């Protein structure tokens, strides 16, 4: 016992104690944020889509595992994915079957949870083109598959969407959407909503033109496709479009806010997350950075990059748009998860979205109109002074603007932002958002980028390093109503794994040196941890097994942009390697090795 | 407070400011160059059936290896053709590192030129028809300099980039495997 306690005392993470929340002046039964009811139905014990539900809460209502018993959590079974690249996807669980989608070559495994040791039922190999690995900016990752109506849908690195029968593993349809010759890949997890499979491209570092497409769920045929740059007719901007702020109003801004023709190679891809409000019939997604990174080559706001679109799921028509970083200076893609919640507002509740954005602000926006209700820093920022709530615009700091031909130093947050793609979890039980994120700053030397189709279009030499305090990762519990952090855990390495919240009051996340951690949802106290074989950047999930017990599953497999130094065997002597991330994680190869292994945990019977 | 005292205070303040403002990386452009001889690797990394001997080095190698203008031209092309976007300044990213001792497709200058011209199946683009043979060999000569292979008087003592690794005059020569080094 003594030994165990001493071990916990030696852990490198530091917990900063919480200030006690003041009770809100509200007559509502629960004075904190709750999940959007229409988008987060009752938990059925499965995990059918990466965000858990359309509200993207990543919250499991199971409560067998609690702060009192989590220390007894033990390994139930493991499975090797036969891949050694960054594993960012969550496992899916539907009934008695678990589905795993791997990084390139994008194998889809089905494991039988009803049998001891979870043997493989089948494996589907989509055989993506090997050359696609050469145009994937940040490791050859895949962010997940999705289940709907007896089928599994997923994307392949070479730009295809597949529908596979969940029972037999046989392909039902496939549709080619991306072209690797132009630098397009697909790494995102699709979302299935209203009979449509929603898919977007990646390649913001390759001078592609960003789009989102809706495929008919039954046939795979394109129902609509909306570009995120170019004339209004391509962007599907019509009479329904009512952006909340004046700078987004006007004809063909997707052309006029760029130098001539630059919108054709301007990025604004869709490689992150999509949420859906069935009641409003709207999907929400963010767009990536504009290309190239060198901002001097693209004067203007660069619509519709680095912003959030609300679109009609049936027609694709844009309903509103908000730009978090007009004329993006720092590669601050706006593709992070969008959590749909209802927050106390006067004596009722207001339908909002919660967005811990890459530029360092935690946005609370009305999801009907896009209006920004608050934008509060949740990490260290010196590159902007805040968000003007009247104009909606980010207020930049002039001396932090990268200029061609010079090095701009100490820009915080760095290119991957205060937080990158790895989603936060929201617990309607505590009303808190659990944010795994980064504390990195950078030096950036901008230079003129040449556009050659199928090659990188970046124009920047970047070098990242730890931000103030020296810790490169932070785990923050954020109260979106009171707009402040409740606790934070400083992590030595950048946090690149998503979070999982559970009704039992335990929150899970992983670190890049392979620790899978369970913390108390109310105060951040470390309750349990397990060392996996490789760094964790995958999404943990919680599900009800065929035996009725609660299981926790996560895949360890370091990589992605942050872990490319390990998965791609990059050389730490070059600080600019992997677009400058290598300089911030030179020690990672000493702390972990590449791998791809599923770990599933349960309490003893 | 006397005005002289005030002036000296200001001077000290300015000097202190100036010192703190010099917050740049240390560069050792005039440092002593590294030694150039390293023992060759133990075992070849390619099977050459029959003899075990690799084919002779392409005759063009002599024109480009250790040729300062060719390496400099290759350095310029390396940025202009976006090689840097994938391989960074030798440390790699989307593509593998070029400054270490691992060569997937051979580290001889003619093997590197072949890789650039024909592409490779895991994502290396094929530049034949986009670049001239001369440019491809210039690039190959520069790529070899990233792992310190050319003679130090042939490489640039100043990197083109603003925040990359040490200049190539200070790049240690990575050991070559026998097959890479054959006939060189």
Image: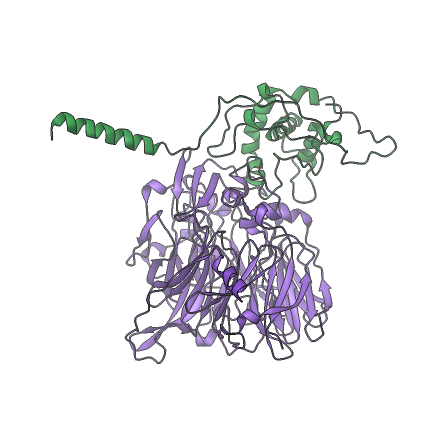
Chain A palette colour: purple
Residue A562's x, y, as percent?
Answer: 53, 49
Residue situated furthest right in the rendering: B50
- Which image quarter holds the N terminus of chain B? top left
- Nearest the viewer among A319 and A37 is A37
- Nearest the viewer among B160 and A280 is B160
Q: Is residue A513 above or below residue B66?
A: below
Residue B140's x, y, as percent?
Answer: 64, 29
Say left or right for B102 vs A415: right
- Nearest the viewer among B161 and B13 is B13
Q: Name the residue rendered at 63%, 21% in the picture.
A: B66
Q: Is residue A113 above or below residue B30?
A: below
Residue A478's x, y, as percent?
Answer: 39, 64
Residue A569's x, y, as percent?
Answer: 62, 44
Question: Looking at the image, can residue A220 be seen?
Answer: no
Q: Name the residue rendered at 74%, 24% in the picture.
A: B58
Provide the letter of the chain coloured green. B
Question: Looking at the image, can residue A464 be seen?
Answer: yes
Q: Is residue A23 above or below residue A325?
A: below
Q: Name the residue rendered at 51%, 43% in the picture.
A: A579
């Amino acid at each position: 016992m003594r030994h165990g306690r001493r071990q916990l005392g030696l852990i490198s993470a530091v917990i900063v104690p919480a200030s006690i929340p003041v009770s809100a002046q509200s007559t509502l039964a629960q004075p904190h944020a709750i999940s959007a009811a229409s988008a987060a139905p009752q938990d059925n014990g499965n995990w059918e889509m990466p965000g858990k539900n359309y509200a993207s809460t990543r919250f499991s209502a199971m409560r067998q595992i609690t702060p009192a018993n989590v220390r007894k959590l033990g390994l139930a079974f493991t499975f090797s994915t036969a891949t050694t690249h960054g594993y960012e996807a969550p496992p899916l669980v539907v009934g008695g079957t678990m589905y795993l989608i791997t990084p390139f070559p994008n194998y889809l495994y089905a494991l039988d949870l009803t049998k001891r040791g979870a043997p493989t039922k089948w494996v589907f190999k989509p055989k993506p083109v090997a050359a696609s690995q050469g145009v994937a900016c940040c490791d050859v990752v895949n962010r997940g598959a999705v289940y709907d109506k007896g089928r599994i849908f997923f994307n392949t690195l070479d730009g295809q969407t597949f529908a596979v029968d969940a029972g037999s593993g046989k392909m039902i349809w496939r549709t080619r959407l991306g072209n690797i010759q132009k630098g397009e890949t697909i790494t995102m997890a699709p979302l299935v909503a209203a009979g449509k499979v929603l898919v977007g491209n990646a390649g913001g570092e390759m001078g592609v033109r960003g789009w989102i497409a809706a495929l008919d769920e039954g046939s795979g045929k394109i129902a609509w496709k909306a570009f995120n740059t170019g004339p209004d007719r391509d962007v599907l901007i019509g009479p329904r479009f009512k952006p909340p702020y004046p700078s987004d109003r006007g004809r063909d801004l997707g052309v006029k806010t760029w130098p001539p023709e630059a919108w054709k190679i301007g990025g604004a891809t869709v490689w992150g997350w999509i949420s859906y409000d069935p009641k409003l019939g709207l999907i929400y997604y963010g767009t990536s950075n504009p290309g190239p990174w060198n901002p001097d080559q693209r004067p203007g706001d660069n619509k519709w990059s680095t912003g959030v679109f609300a679109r009609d799921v049936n027609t694709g028509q844009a309903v509103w748009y908000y730009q978090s970083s007009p004329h993006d200076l720092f590669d601050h893609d706006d593709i992070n998860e969008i959590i749909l919640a209802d927050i106390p507002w006067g004596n009722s509740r207001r339908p909002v979205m919660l967005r811990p954005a890459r530029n360092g602000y935690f946005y609370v926006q009305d999801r009907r109109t896009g209006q920004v209700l608050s934008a509060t820093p949740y990490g260290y920022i010196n590159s902007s002074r805040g968000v003007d709530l009247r104009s909606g615009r980010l207020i930049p700091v002039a001396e932090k603007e990268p200029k061609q031909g010079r090095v701009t130093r100490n820009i915080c947050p760095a290119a991957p932002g205060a937080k990158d793609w790895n989603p936060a979890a929201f617990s309607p039980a505590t009303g808190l958002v659990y944010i795994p994120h980064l504390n990195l700053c950078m030096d950036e030397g901008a230079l003129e980028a040449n556009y050659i189709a199928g090659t990188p279009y970046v124009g920047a030499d970047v070098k990242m390093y730890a931000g103030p305090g020296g810790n490169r990762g932070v785990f923050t519990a954020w109260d979106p109503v009171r707009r402040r952090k409740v606790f934070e855990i400083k992590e030595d390495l950048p946090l690149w794994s998503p979070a999982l919240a559970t009704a039992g009051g335990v929150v899970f996340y992983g670190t890049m040196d392979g620790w899978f951690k369970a913390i108390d949802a109310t105060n951040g106290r470390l309750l349990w941890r397990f060392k996996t074989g490789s760094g964790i950047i995958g999404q943990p999930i919680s599900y009800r097994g065929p035996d009725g017990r609660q299981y926790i599953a996560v895949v360890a497999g370091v990589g992605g942009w942050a872990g490319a130094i390990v998965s791609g065997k990059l050389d730490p002597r070059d600080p600019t390697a992997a677009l400058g991330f290598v300089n911030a994680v030179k020690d990672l190869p000493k702390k972990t090795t590449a791998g791809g292994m599923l770990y599933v945990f349960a309490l003893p019977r | 407070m006397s005005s002289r005292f005030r002036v000296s205070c200001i001077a000290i303040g300015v000097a202190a400011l100036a010192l703190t403002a010099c917050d740049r990386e240390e560069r050792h452009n005039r440092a002593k160059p590294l030694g150039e001889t390293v023992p060759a690797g133990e075992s070849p990394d390619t099977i050459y059936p029959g003899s075990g001997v690799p084919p002779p080095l392409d005759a063009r190698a002599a024109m480009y290896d250790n040729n300062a203008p060719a390496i400099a031209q290759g350095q310029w092309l390396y940025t202009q053709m976006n090689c840097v976007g994938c391989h960074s300044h030798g440390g790699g990213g989307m593509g593998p590192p070029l400054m270490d001792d691992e060569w997937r497709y051979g580290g001889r200058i003619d093997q590197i030129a072949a890789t650039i011209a024909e592409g490779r199946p895991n994502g290396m683009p094929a530049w034949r028809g986009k670049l001239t043979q001369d440019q491809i060999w210039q690039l190959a000569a520069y790529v070899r300099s990233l792992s310190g292979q050319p003679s130090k008087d042939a490489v640039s003592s100043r990197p083109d980039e603003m925040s990359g690794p040490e200049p190539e005059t200070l790049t240690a020569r990575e050991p070559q495997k026998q097959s890479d080094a054959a006939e060189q």
